[in-house]
Structures are given as structure tokens and as C-alpha cells.
């Protein structure tokens, strides 16, 4: 009996509801991943899509985190919504609801146990073990939604082979398929089996909470009885916590009808918002789209509304459903009102429980309403406008939910429009003129660089001091690099470099003397290197790596107080994360930390506050360079200083994946 790789399987409605709520709240990947990971049907759907031909011959996904990063939250939202709609088509009886709840508890217990055993026994990828624990008995889930008794029995009997076939079809690899295929083998047959096979087989036994599972732990993985029982106890407690957070009863009888009804209402609200939005003309300019959708918003919520567009530093009243509109333009800077605060935070703000400002009172007067709700329209990183709704406190929650659904769809529409907007002829010509001017300027700058380089070469030959000669060689190398960067910029507008592996430690060591003689020439400033002993060969570009280090170290020095401080450059290798091998770079300072206002726009181009000689582009350039090298950058900051952590792909990573 053939099984489709893109399965349509039932989920517990509580899980689907929570996943939809997380999408509506623009939750982070970790929150969404935790919800998805608890449900076998959602795991199967996301694995099938992430490893489908839609993404070409890319590296196969072997964890939920990787799958979410590949899909993105918007596509995942569509996936969950589709799954929710299909969920409504499953007509489950009382016994089947009970079976679905018991299946959910068993699969989650197996997955959490597999991850714990993988960590305990030093298996290199605990997330892979968790994933296989979630799908090991997927044949049972297929059986629950199968109407005929004969077909049900087939899925129950062959669930190990079904899971193995799906693991192969989803590109999880032969070891994963074997872990599925031999999960029910006798403990005595698993003594010298593969590590992953042992973990999954023992996890399925321990999830049943019987004596044979505890006994098998010693045979399969050499674990004593006391440790095994403690693992099972902790996993049981963790499963109960997950169930409680989702509102799923685990001890009493279970029926999903009430949660399904709530799921229907949620989907209906989203459908209403979509239908209302479709009544507006979405082909116009962004301000015109916003102005027109205010009527649809009032239709959805039943509340009078005003629409403000964002123009430079102002919020300008564009339209409303209150009759004749006054001319009104206010500063977009936060001034205490719900309107400016919502625009500044990028989140809905209600007047409930707040003392109204003068602007709040003006808006309530215009809307003829006793209270106020402001909801921004977020289109990616931009906020092109904001809605103000006149409300009362009796239906605040329902109004907020409908308004958020509607404005989220408006924001997505505007974001798509803005991303598809190409340059005009005038912009193209202007860009060409700027490029020609850049070439001329580069040519003029290159001349003195060449002269300086020649003088350095002559000076070096006259000096006998080897240390001075080495310093002059470094200066000449940096001049060569600057010249190459200028030429590349003038030719293509972007920086390119050799694809040969680069030693991160080597680049840092070559910069050490330059940094020490320039940025750390004052005694109160200290530079410390903590370089890994292992190979730090990365799949990056030498000039890009140097640019990243120089920018971050310069920022770190400028963050130090006048009394001085320390900057530390550290490397670590190898680092394993998300099934890849990385080399880590950390640059830390002992400054006062990054202000919250700056932190919110950390990697975006901003107007500098450092004065003349600074462009405000440093961190945005660093982020772009790291992204271009397929790296990961993160920052942590506090009163005791700031640390930037970068993971560069190791030069051997592709080879390791093939092995």
C-alpha cells in the first residue's frame, strides 16, 4: 500500500490553534518550533514541504528548526491554515479522539526520551533523534483517520516499514530509515546496532512505561535501572507540562469537539478578514491602498476607523469612516498617545487602563467612541501606516483579534508590492551616473595609493630591521586590499574575493599588530586574543573577514569609556550547530552596553550619533558580509559589556555533509 509523502493527517485541534495564534502574533522561530514539534501531523507536513522539489537539490532538512528557517513564517502560516481547514474535514468519533490524544502523548514522550538519550550518550544530533521519535509510529496516526478495519490493521501492522519509507522519501538518510525499520527489534539483537537505531528502539519502549523497557535500557545502551527510571520520570513531567500549556487533558477522557469549534471560529475570522480585504483596490499606491482599506476594516470589526499614513516624520490622516475629515498631521515620535506609541512599538496599543492624552481625546471625539485602539500596519521592516479604531470595552478582545488579522494581511500585501517595485527609468539613469562618477573617483584615489605603495617598497629595501620590514609588508598588503576593494566597487558595485578557504586565526593574527598600533595605542586600552588551537579554516573571503573584524573591533573600542577597558577577540573550532560545522568568532568589549533604542535597529543603516568621520553603516555592512558568506551573527549586551558572536561555515563543512 503506497503512502503519499505529503500526508494529510489529523492533529489535536489545540495544537493547531496555538500554532495559528503564534503566527498571528508574529512569534519567533523558537516559539513556533516548540509548538510544531509537539505534533506528528504538523512535523510530517513541514518535513514534506521543506524537503520537496520546490527547493531544488538543496541540503535535506533533518530538524523542525531547519525546516522553519527554510520555509519562513509566512509560508508556514499558510501551511498551518491549510492543515487547519483539512482538520475540519476529519469527522472523528469519541473513541478516535481518545486514540488521537493517546497517540499524541506517546509520540511526544518517545521524541523527548530520544533527545534525552541522545544527549546522555553523546549522539551528535539530538534534534534528529527527537524528530524520528515524533514520526516513528506515524502508521498509527494514518490508521486513526482510515475508515475500513482492514486498512487500519495494515497500518498498525506495518507502521515500522511505513515510517522507514517516509524517512527515505523525505531525505532523512539511510541511518534514519534503519532506526525506523528496526525500532521493534529485540534488545538482544541491538547490542551492536547503530547508535541512532538503539536510541529510537529504547525510546519507544520507555514511552510505554513498562518494566521491559527499563530492563532493555541496560542491554541496549548500558544504562542502570535508577538512571533509566529518573529519565522516564522527568520526561513524563515534561509531557504533562506541554499538555497543560496547550490545554490538552492527559488524565481524563478527551474529546476535541469544543477545541474544533474554536478552531472553526478562528478560521472563519481569518476568512472574513481576507474577504473584506479583497473588496479593496490593492493595485494602487500604498497610501491609496491604506486609505481604501479603512472601509473594509470597519466592515470586519463594526467599529469606526481612521487611517494615518507615514510620511517622513509625520503621521498624516488619510481617510476614515466618520464622514468629513479634518486636516490632521502629527509627529510620528512617541508622545504618550496610543497612536504614536503603537507606531513606535509596531504593536497594537489600547487606551484601556491608560490616562488619555490630548491626541487620544481628539481621536475619540472624531470617532464618537468611549475608547480607542491603535493598530500599526507592518510591511516587513517598514510601517507605512496605522489605523485608529473607536471601541468600547465590552468587545475589546474580539475587535483586537479581527483587526490584527486584517492589518496583518494588509501589511503582507503592501510588503509584496514594495518588494516587487522595480527602479524607474529615472532611477536607473541616476544610478548609472553615480556609477560613472564612482569609477572616476576610484581612479583618482588609486593614483596616490600606487605612489604610496612604491615608496613603502623603496623604504623597506633601505631598512635592515626585520621587524620594521614586517610592519611595512603589512601596510603594503592593506594598501593592496584597499585598492582591490575600490576596483571591485567601481566595476560591479559589490565586493568579491577568492573562494579559497581562509584561516580565521591567520587573518586575526595579521591584523593584530595594525590594531595594536592604531586603535590600542593608548595604555588604558587593552586587546586580548584567545585563538583556538584547532584549524579555523572557513569558507569565506579574506577581505570580507578582515572588514568584519576591523568594523567590530573599531566599534568595540569606541564603546569603551574614557577610563579605558578591554576588547577580546576569540575563536573556537569546531562548533556543531544545525547539522553543520562552523568556526566561531567572538568580539567582546567591557563598555556600558548598547542602548535599547540602538539595539532595535542594530544591523540597519542608521544616522550616526558618533560625529564626523562615521557613516552609521558599520554594522549593516558587517551583517551583509556575514550573510553573503552564509554565516550567522548575533549580539548580546548588558551593563558589563557587549559581545558579537559570528558563526562562519567551516571550509570542511560540505565535505563533512557528504561523508
Image (cartoon, helix red, strand yellow):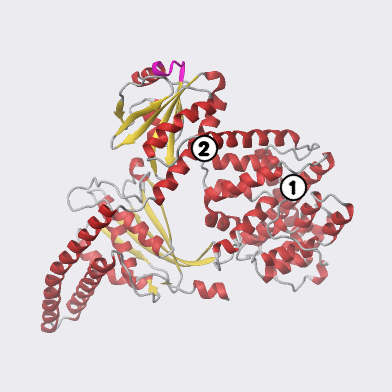
Graded by Cα atoms within 10 Å as few (under 14), some (14 to 19) or many (20 or more), the crowding at tag 2 reads few
Judging depth in this view, the residue of 30 and 126 nearest the camera is 30
Q: Earlier in the sequence, mark 1 or mark 2?
A: 1
- Above or below residue 378? Residue 629 is below
Q: Position of residue 283 (x, y in %)?
A: 43, 42
Judging depth in this view, the residue of 126 and 642 nearest the camera is 126
Q: Position of residue 170 (x, y in %)?
A: 65, 64
Residue 370 part of the magenta-drawn span? yes
Quarter residue 657 falls in: bottom right
Graded by Cα atoms within 10 Å as few (under 14), some (14 to 19) or many (20 or more), the crowding at tag 1 reads many
Kindly report which numbered mark, 1 or 2, lies closer to the viewer in this rendering.
2
Marks 1/2: CA distance?
A: 41 Å
Residue drawn 33% across and 44% down?
Answer: 598
Magenta residues, start to end: 365-371
Q: Position of residue 213 (x, y in %)?
A: 80, 58
- 240 vs 314, left or right, is right
Q: Quadrant of the C terminus?
A: bottom right
Q: Which residue is the site of mark 2?
A: 278
Q: Secondary structure at mark 1?
A: helix
Residue 105 marker: 1
Amino acid at each position: 500500500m503506497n503512502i503519499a509523502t505529503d500526508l494529510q493527517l489529523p492533529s489535536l485541534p489545540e495544537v493547531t490553534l496555538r500554532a495559528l495564534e503564534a503566527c498571528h502574533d508574529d512569534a519567533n522561530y523558537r516559539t513556533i518550533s516548540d509548538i510544531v514539534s509537539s505534533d506528528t501531523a504538523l512535523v510530517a507536513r513541514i518535513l514534506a514541504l521543506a524537503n520537496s522539489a520546490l527547493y531544488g537539490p538543496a541540503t535535506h532538512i533533518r530538524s523542525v528548526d531547519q525546516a522553519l528557517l527554510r520555509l519562513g513564517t509566512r509560508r508556514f502560516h499558510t501551511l498551518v491554515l491549510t492543515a487547519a481547514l483539512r482538520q475540519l474535514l476529519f469527522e472523528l468519533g469519541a473513541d478516535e479522539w481518545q486514540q488521537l490524544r493517546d497517540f499524541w502523548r506517546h509520540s511526544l514522550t518517545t521524541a523527548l526520551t530520544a533527545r534525552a538519550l541522545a544527549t546522555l550518550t553523546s549522539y551528535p544530533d539530538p534534534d534528529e533523534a527527537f524528530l524520528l521519535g515524533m514520526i516513528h509510529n506515524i502508521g498509527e496516526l494514518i490508521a486513526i483517520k482510515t475508515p475500513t478495519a482492514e486498512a487500519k490493521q495494515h497500518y498498525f501492522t506495518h507502521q515500522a516499514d511505513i515510517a522507514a519509507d517516509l524517512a527515505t522519501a523525505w531525505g532523512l538518510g539511510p541511518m534514519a530509515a534503519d532506526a525506523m525499520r528496526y525500532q521493534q527489534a529485540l534488545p538482544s539483537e541491538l547490542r551492536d546496532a547503530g547508535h541512532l537505531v538503539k536510541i529510537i528502539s529504547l525510546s519507544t519502549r520507555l514511552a510505554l512505561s513498562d518494566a521491559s523497557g527499563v530492563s532493555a535500557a541496560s542491554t541496549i545502551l548500558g544504562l542502570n535501572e535508577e538512571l533509566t527510571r529518573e529519565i522516564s520520570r522527568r520526561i513524563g513531567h515534561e509531557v504533562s507540562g506541554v499538555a497543560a500549556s496547550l490545554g490538552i487533558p492527559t488524565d481524563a477522557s478527551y474529546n476535541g469537539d469544543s477545541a474544533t469549534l474554536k478552531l472553526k471560529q478562528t478560521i472563519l475570522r481569518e476568512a472574513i478578514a481576507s474577504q473584506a480585504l479583497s473588496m479593496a483596490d490593492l493595485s494602487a499606491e500604498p497610501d491609496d491602498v491604506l486609505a481604501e482599506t479603512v472601509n473594509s476594516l470597519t466592515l470586519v470589526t463594526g467599529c469606526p476607523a481612521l487611517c494615518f499614513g507615514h510620511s517622513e516624520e509625520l503621521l498624516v490622516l488619510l481617510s476614515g469612516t466618520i464622514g468629513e475629515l479634518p486636516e490632521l498631521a502629527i509627529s510620528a515620535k512617541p508622545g504618550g498617545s496610543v497612536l504614536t506609541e503603537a507606531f513606535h512599538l509596531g504593536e497594537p496599543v489600547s487606551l484601556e487602563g491608560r490616562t488619555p492624552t490630548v491626541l487620544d481625546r481628539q481621536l475619540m471625539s472624531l470617532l464618537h467612541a468611549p475608547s480607542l485602539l491603535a493598530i500599526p500596519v507592518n510591511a516587513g521592516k517598514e510601517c507605512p501606516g496605522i489605523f485608529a479604531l473607536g471601541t468600547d470595552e465590552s468587545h475589546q478582545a474580539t475587535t483586537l483579534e479581527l483587526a490584527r488579522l486584517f492589518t496583518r494581511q494588509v501589511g503582507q500585501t503592501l510588503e509584496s508590492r514594495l518588494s516587487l517595485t522595480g527602479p524607474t527609468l529615472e532611477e536607473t539613469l541616476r544610478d548609472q551616473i553615480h556609477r560613472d562618477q564612482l569609477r572616476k573617483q576610484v581612479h583618482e584615489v588609486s593614483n596616490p595609493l600606487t605612489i604610496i605603495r612604491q615608496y613603502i617598497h623603496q623604504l623597506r629595501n633601505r631598512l635592515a630591521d626585520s621587524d620594521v620590514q614586517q610592519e611595512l609588508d603589512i601596510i603594503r598588503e592593506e594598501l593592496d586590499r584597499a585598492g582591490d576593494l575600490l576596483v571591485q566597487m567601481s566595476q560591479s558595485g559589490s565586493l568579491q574575493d577568492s573562494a579559497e578557504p581562509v584561516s580565521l586565526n591567520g587573518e586575526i593574527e595579521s591584523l593584530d599588530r595594525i590594531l595594536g598600533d592604531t586603535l590600542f595605542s593608548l595604555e588604558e586600552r587593552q586587546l586580548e586574543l584567545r585563538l583556538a588551537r584547532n584549524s579555523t579554516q572557513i569558507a569565506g573571503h579574506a577581505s570580507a573577514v578582515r572588514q568584519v573584524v576591523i568594523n567590530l573591533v573599531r566599534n568595540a573600542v569606541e564603546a569603551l569609556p574614557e577610563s579605558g577597558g578591554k576588547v577580546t577577540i576569540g575563536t573556537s573550532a569546531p562548533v556543531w550547530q544545525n547539522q553543520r560545522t562552523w568556526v566561531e568568532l567572538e568580539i567582546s568589549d567591557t563598555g556600558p552596553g548598547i542602548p535599547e533604542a540602538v539595539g532595535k535597529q542594530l544591523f540597519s543603516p542608521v544616522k550616526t550619533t558618533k560625529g564626523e568621520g562615521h557613516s552609521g553603516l558599520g554594522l549593516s555592512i558587517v551583517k551583509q558580509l556575514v550573510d553573503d558568506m552564509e554565516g550567522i551573527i548575533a549580539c548580546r549586551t548588558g551593563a558589563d559589556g557587549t559581545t558579537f558572536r559570528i558563526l562562519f561555515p567551516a571550509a570542511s563543512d560540505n565535505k563533512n555533509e557528504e561523508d
